[in-house]
Image: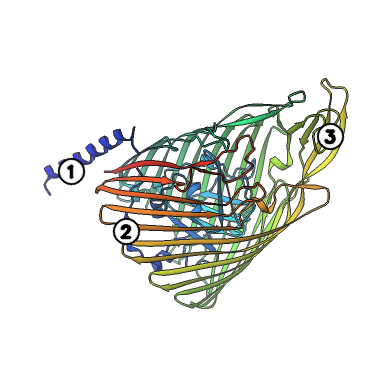
């Protein structure tokens, strides 16, 4: 092709992109994807996808001695999801519920609630678990979906390698290398729910072995719907920019900065009539992070890995104003193989600075604090019978400022009957350490009017939850077993079963009821604190399967069953009930290449009812029609929640911010040049 023809082709791409972006003011499209590459992979090759989150070493899904599920870039692109949280619905055993624009409740194997505190979430190994409230602010995790290589979902405890708070599972979001995102990318979308989203990205190289990318993104989501009708005040607006730099396979430096605003309503308690007032809660957040990773391989086969990151986050809302500054350093050394032993060891240190501003409903003592965490871990994978039987033993010792030393051991046994099948069993211990929310905060939860049930007070009753300095760790002992089978080159299946035993789960304890006659207006004070007063047993089964029907059609499916039993000490109020998590969940996804230009993909999700909230079961169906306009231009037309106008996913329908997920449609154009 002549230079003149190349210029014409480039001009055609630019012109097509400009015209299509302009049309998106009134139209609706989704994501560019390498459909041919994805369909070139058999089910067998998908099982050979490398993961690192299960054992902190590179291994395939087939080899991992844990309940591992990988959500690939192709899964994200072809499903039509618009957020990382929504993409997690594809993994079996992961409970995903949306309460509002950007407001998500996500956990693994039960105990789902806002800011689920038993799930460790990371981006490229950088934890995004909030140390103040113990959980993940999903509305702040709006990375460009195009830059995600895969999402590794480890169901079950991961404390031996990743430390405290990885009780029910680990989610590690792995982004693409800069080398894989060369050139320019422009993406724009518009629709009925995601009102607009724009991404601009540039990838390049600074030398033969050094690559970079930079991006800027803006998105608007919402509003959702009130159960009684009308729009809920829950829009989300997010702006962010970031970069990644890679040199060889040895050095990675990446960072992001963002501002985010979401809208809700908030009830502020009052000690005089009407005893509460509702006001808009415009929640603004901002943050930035910087991550550096370095690796060095030695001639004897050993490997040294270093990682450090800094993370700044600030939230401003009616309930509180908080700021977290984190400095984290970790080192890992993979020793050369000695006989039948593959040994890895490492350690780390994390310093967290917390600053909390008092509001009318919340106070904390001290207002600023520094928290220190030291850890060390070691793991040995022993080849009992090479290529057939492996035993992995490991433990992590971690010291925190709340409870001192915590130990999290595990043992895993693997058997490979042949090169197509894997059987594994494990026993693990994991812990969740207290957060300042439990140990230092005084919260004005509500004011009950005179005569209100269940206390029937003569005066207004001010209900406060106070700090609990002696709050201890929550503990889990877990037993798991799994089986994988590459049935044919086109069909694979995976099943995992678990039995979990929890102790020291959080509950509310009523401490005292005191009259306060000297204040005007007068009121009574009901004080409570948090206690480790609940235990639980959970067990269940999770399955997943992939079938490459032919060269143009693939099917993926997942299903999970969960049983829960909770025991509560006398005189305590539960923080959670079994009816807050669905007993059954399932999904079925179809990816179909109609021809070289068109693709049609559908996803169906089933979620069982939540009796604790009287939320009925629902089936969600999404569809994604893709059109490859040219080699560098992709249009997608996506419909979500197609079966019904709205459906409710979590919480009480009478709650102040109760919102239903609406049926929606959007269109996206992605241009690469």
Q: Would residue 179 be visible to someone looking at this image?
A: no
Q: Splitting the image into 4 quarters, where does residue 298 fall?
A: bottom left
Q: Residues within 10 Å of mark 1 (few under 14, many from 20)?
A: few
x and y percentages locating residue 61 in the rendered image? 47, 65
Mark 1 and mark 2 in contact (Cβ < 8 Å)? no
Q: Position of residue 594 (x, y in %)?
A: 29, 57
- The local crowd at label 3, few if under 14, some if 14 to 19, many if 20 or more residues have their Cα within 10 Å, is few
Image disc number at residue 234: none
Tag in front: 3 or 2: 3
Q: Tag 1 or tag 3, which sits nearer the N-term?
A: 1
Q: Are marks 3 and 2 in contact (CB under 8 Å)?
A: no
> Furthest-top residue in view?
520
- Of the 4 image quadrants, the one containing the C terminus is top left
The residue beneath circle 3 is 456
Q: How is the image coloured?
A: rainbow
Relative to 49, say whether 7 is above or below.
above
The residue labelled by disc 2 is: 37
**Label 2 neighbour load within 10 Å: few <14, some 14-19, many 20+:** few
**Camera-side mark, 3 or 1:** 3
Q: Nearer the viewer, residue 305 or 12?
A: 12
Coordinates of residue 248 in the picture (x, y in percent): 37, 53
For marks 2 and 1, the one nearer the N-term is: 1
* First in residue order: circle 3 vs circle 2: 2
Q: Residue at x 40, y 58 (%)?
A: 590
Name the secondary structure under disc 2: helix
SS label for mark 1: helix
**Residue 9 numbered mark, or none:** 1
């Amino acid at each position: 092709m002549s230079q003149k023809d190349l210029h014409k082709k480039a001009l055609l791409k630019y012109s097509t992109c400009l015209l299509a972006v302009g049309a998106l003011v009134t139209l609706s499209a989704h994501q560019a994807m390498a459909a041919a590459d994805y369909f070139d992979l058999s089910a067998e090759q998908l099982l050979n996808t490398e993961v690192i989150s299960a054992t902190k070493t590179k291994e395939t899904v087939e080899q991992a001695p844990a309940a591992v599920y990988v959500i690939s870039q192709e899964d994200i692109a072809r499903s039509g999801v618009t957020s990382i949280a929504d993409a997690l619905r594809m993994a079996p055993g992961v409970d995903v519920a949306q309460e509002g624009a950007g407001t998500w409740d996500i956990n693994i194997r039960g105990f789902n609630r806002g800011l689920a505190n038993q799930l460790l979430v990371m981006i490229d190994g950088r934890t995004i678990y909030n140390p103040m409230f113990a959980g993940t602010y999903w509305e702040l995790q709006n990375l460009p979906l195009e830059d995600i290589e895969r999402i590794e979902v480890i169901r079950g405890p991961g404390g031996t390698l990743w430390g405290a708070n990885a009780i029910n599972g680990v989610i590690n979001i792995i982004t693409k290398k800069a080398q894989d995102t060369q050139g320019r990318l422009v993406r724009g979308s518009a629709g009925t729910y995601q009102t607009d989203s724009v991404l601009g990205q540039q990838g390049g190289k600074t030398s033969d072995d050094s690559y970079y990318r930079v991006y800027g993104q803006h998105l608007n989501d919402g509003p959702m719907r009130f159960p009684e009708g009308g729009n809920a005040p829950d829009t989300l607006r997010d702006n962010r920019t970031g970069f990644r730099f890679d040199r060889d396979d040895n050095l990675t430096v990446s960072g992001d900065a963002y501002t985010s605003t979401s809208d809700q309503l908030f009830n502020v308690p009052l000690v005089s009539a009407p005893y509460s007032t509702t006001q808009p809660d415009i929640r603004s957040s901002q943050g930035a992070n910087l991550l550096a990773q370095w690796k060095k391989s030695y001639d004897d086969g050993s490997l040294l890995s270093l990682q450090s990151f800094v993370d700044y986050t600030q939230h401003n809302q009616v309930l509180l104003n908080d700021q977290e500054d984190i400095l984290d350093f970790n080192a890992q050394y993979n020793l050369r193989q000695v006989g039948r032993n593959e040994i890895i060891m490492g350690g780390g240190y994390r310093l967290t600075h917390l600053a909390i501003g008092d509001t009318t409903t919340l106070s904390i003592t001290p207002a600023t604090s520094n928290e220190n965490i030291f850890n060390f871990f070691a793991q040995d994978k022993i080849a009992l019978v090479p290529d057939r039987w492996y035993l992995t033993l490991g433990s992590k010792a971690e010291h925190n400022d709340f409870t001192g030393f915590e130990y999290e051991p595990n043992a895993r046994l693997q058997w490979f009957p042949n090169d197509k099948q894997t059987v594994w069993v494990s026993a693990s211990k994991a812990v969740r350490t207290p957060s300042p929310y439990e140990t230092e905060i005084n919260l004005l939860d509500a004011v009950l009017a005179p005569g209100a049930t269940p206390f029937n007070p003569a005066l207004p009753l001010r209900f406060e939850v106070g700090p609990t300095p002696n709050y201890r760790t929550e503990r889990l002992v877990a037993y798991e077993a799994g089986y994988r089978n590459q049935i044919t080159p086109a069909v694979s299946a995976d099943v995992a079963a678990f039995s979990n035993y929890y102790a020291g789960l959080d509950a509310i304890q009523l401490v005292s009821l005191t009259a306060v006659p000297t204040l005007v207006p007068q009121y009574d004070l009901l004080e409570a604190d948090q206690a480790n007063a609940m235990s639980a047993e959970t067990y269940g089964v999770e399955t997943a399967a992939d079938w490459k029907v032919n060269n143009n059609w693939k099917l993926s499916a997942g299903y999970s069953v969960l049983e829960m039993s909770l025991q509560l000490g006398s005189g305590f109020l539960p923080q959670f009930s079994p009816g807050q998590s669905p007993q059954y969940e399932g999904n079925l996804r179809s990816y179909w290449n109609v021809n070289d230009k068109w693709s049609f993909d559908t996803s169906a999700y089933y979620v069982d009812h939540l009796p604790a909230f009287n939320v009925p079961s629902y089936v969600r169906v999404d569809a994604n029609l893709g059109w490859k306009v040219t080699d560098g231009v992709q249009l997608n037309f996506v419909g979500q929640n197609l079966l019904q106008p709205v459906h409710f996913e979590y919480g009480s329908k009478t709650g102040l911010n109760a919102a239903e997920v609406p049926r929606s449609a959007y269109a996206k154009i992605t241009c690469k040049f």
